[in-house]
Amino acid sequence: MEDLKQAIISYSSKDLEQRKNWYSPAAEAYNKARPRYPEDLTHQVAEIAQLSTNSKILEVGCGPATATIAFAQLGCSMICLEPNPDFFRLAQQNCRMYPNVEIENTSFEEWTLQPSKFDAVLAASSFHWISPEVGYQKAANALQQTGNLILLWNKELQPSSEVYQRLSKIYQLYAPSLDRYEDIETQEEILRALGNMSIDSGQFKDLISGQVVSEVTYNVDEYLMLLNTYSPYLKLPPDTKKALFKGLRQSIEYDFGGSLHLSYISAFHIAKKI
């Protein structure tokens, strides 16, 4: 999965200040449009990692608390790191009912290590933003000897391949570089590679993986809001994005009745500190 490694290098090698502010233009949209993690998935994770009210969790890059609340509801004591100021504000709002959650406006790289303190280090669709040379070692150092690294992932929401074929014509017109469809086998291959990276780091062992496939329906406004939270769309020139979104809107309204049926894989990787 050389493409995956290159993608992670491209994200994690960005200037830290650039990474901190990357999602600011889409922070509110991210909070509204990105799906949460399925209850079944978080229950599996809690059981495998043996999380309880006594557990101490360090969350890396919590965003607007997309996964945080599911673990806060278990009664775990959580320190959540979020470098983006807009996500930090949203996470504070979303977690205000949970006194067991402390949110710090800092990056994992800048965070002062508290060695061997945590039962779990959790990262939900965020660990690829941290250099592998830094992330795995620091996560291992933060964990108690029997602690777990927990990586959660929500893959991109996808329409059926038949629907995508219709939308592909619009991408070819306005943003051909984004005309890319991942079938479920490709997404599963990417997820396997992400899990194996934790073992390849030499810091973790005994990888356990699992996944849940979810189906949702987004209306055209929700779908375009969702697309606007994905990194390739954030990088588009404004005029290109405007033309692309206008074409997508017309097609979704005319061809598909104003909404799309979407599916996505949610996955977990749990590995023990060596």
Image: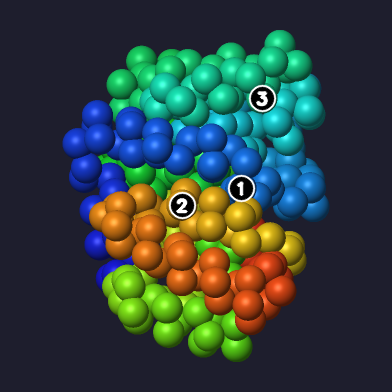
The structure residue drawn at horizontal position 63% and vertical position 77%, both measured from the top left corner, is 254
The span from disc 3 to disc 2 (Cα, nearest Å) is: 21 Å
Judged left or right of residue 179, residue 81 is right
Judged left or right of residue 262, residue 250 is left
Residue under circle 2?
228
Secondary structure under the numbered disc 2 in the rendered image: loop
Front residue of 182/81: it is: 182
Q: Mark 3 or mark 1: which comes first in sequence?
A: 1
Q: Mark 3 or mark 2: which comes first in sequence?
A: 3
Q: Mark 1 or mark 2: which comes first in sequence?
A: 1
Residue under circle 3?
94
- Tell us which disc is closer to us: 3 or 1: 1
Q: Amino acid at mark 3?
A: Asn
**Residue 211 visible in the picture:** no
Residue under circle 1?
33
The span from disc 3 to disc 1 (Cα, nearest Å) is: 15 Å
Whether 242 is drawn above or below 162: the answer is: above
